Amino acid sequence: MTLNIHDFFEENFPWLIEVRRHIHKYPELSWQEYETTLYIQDKLHEIGLTDITKPLDTGVVALINPHLASNGCIALRADIDALPILEKRAHSYTSQNRGVMHACGHDVHTTCLLGAAKFLFANKDNIKHCIKLIFQPSEEKQPSGAQAMINAGVLDNPKVTKIFGLHVTPELQVGKLGFRKGAFMASADEIYITIQGKGGHAASPHLCIDPVSIGVQIYQALQLLVSRFTNPTTPTVISISSFQAGSGATNIIPNEAKLTGTLRTFDENHRKFLLQSIHELSNNIAKSYGAKVEVNIPDGIPFVYNDEALTQACFDVATEFVSSENTLWMPIRMGAEDFSYYGHHTSAVFFRLGTGNTDKNTEIPVHNENFDIDENALKIGAGFLSLLGLKG
């Protein structure tokens, strides 16, 4: 070994900070990560890797020891896209792309994976298997970058036998790692319902087909799907997050109403039932009042499933790496992550990296205009990914 992992990342901490701040300073939205892709390629070349490909227009895949793939191929994944958020926090690395911000920590994920690449390549002669580094576009937006990468063959040639990914977690203090066996994060489907009625004067509702009242009934029926048709052991949410109708005039019944929302659950059969039920309920209610309805639910993201035995093994390794006091079991989360696609094809573990520090005001949630991290987390994230690459 060149150095033990902790010593290596103490020595390379300034490099990690430089990389993370560059990526944070120049964020790019989903499917637009062209400069980020070039930067990752440059850093991989700088490290010494040569087996580097670009399966899609953005995103990068690199291999270490591809000639040892017959001994197994361990994949490490990071997402590289940013969010359409105007950063409010002022520092030397504040986003220079106005209205775009790494508010979900993907700059951290990418930096940690580049750090792991640096360590693993330096020690490749002591590694007896293949390692695949996946820098994935478009985690934040559909169509999913994970699904697109899988469709492009990222889990094949060589075939991935295990895959690991991480996510920043500001509610966990820096230095801590969080795990969960089995179902960890929910599936996510976007719901778009458009009701076409017949508008007219509000004083004559009998001459109209009121899409507002129909929309209210559809909303209530969807809530009953959860409360009356969901097993209590399967956490499920149907949230309608917007209801748009009318011009604001008090005396006009509009022609149209629109509802949008999300479905979250942890069981694929139940998810299928609910998706079908949303279509049927909406159509039946609208039809009963003489209205037309269009229900659009694009293909969403499945739930994150962590292989139980592999997760336990990771937990045990983490207790040695950051101590048992800093290694935690975590509750399920209703948030979604497209890392889920990988776990439905091969053994996978998605874990949480603590980035919170009260003194540095880094406990602000993700997807917030003031989000930031304690950069000491970079050493933990890069180090633990390196350890997973070594041990598998």
Image: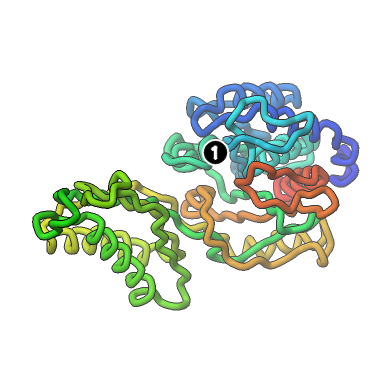
Task: Please determine whether, in this image, residue 275 is positioned above or below residue 260.
Answer: below
Residue corresponding to mark 1: 158
Residue 320 on image: x %, y % = 82, 60
Residue 379 on image: x %, y % = 81, 44
Q: Toward which corner of the image does residue 185 lie, by quadrant? A: bottom right
Q: Amino acid at mark 1?
A: Pro
Q: Toward which corner of the image does residue 208 lie, by quadrant? A: bottom left
| Side (left or right) of 357 relative to 157 | right
Nearer to the camera, 185 or 289: 289
Residue at image point 30% right, 65% down: 273
Residue at image point 61% right, 27% down: 98
| Side (left or right) of 138 relative to 112 | left
Nearer to the camera, 355 or 14: 355
Nearer to the camera, 259 or 13: 259
State whether residue 47 appears in this view. Answer: yes
Task: Please determine whether, in this image, residue 354 is positioned above or below residue 145.
Answer: below
Task: Please determine whether, in this image, residue 45 is positioned above or below residue 314.
Answer: above
Residue 304 on image: x %, y % = 52, 57
Residue at image point 47% right, 51% down: 345
Residue at image point 87% right, 46% down: 6
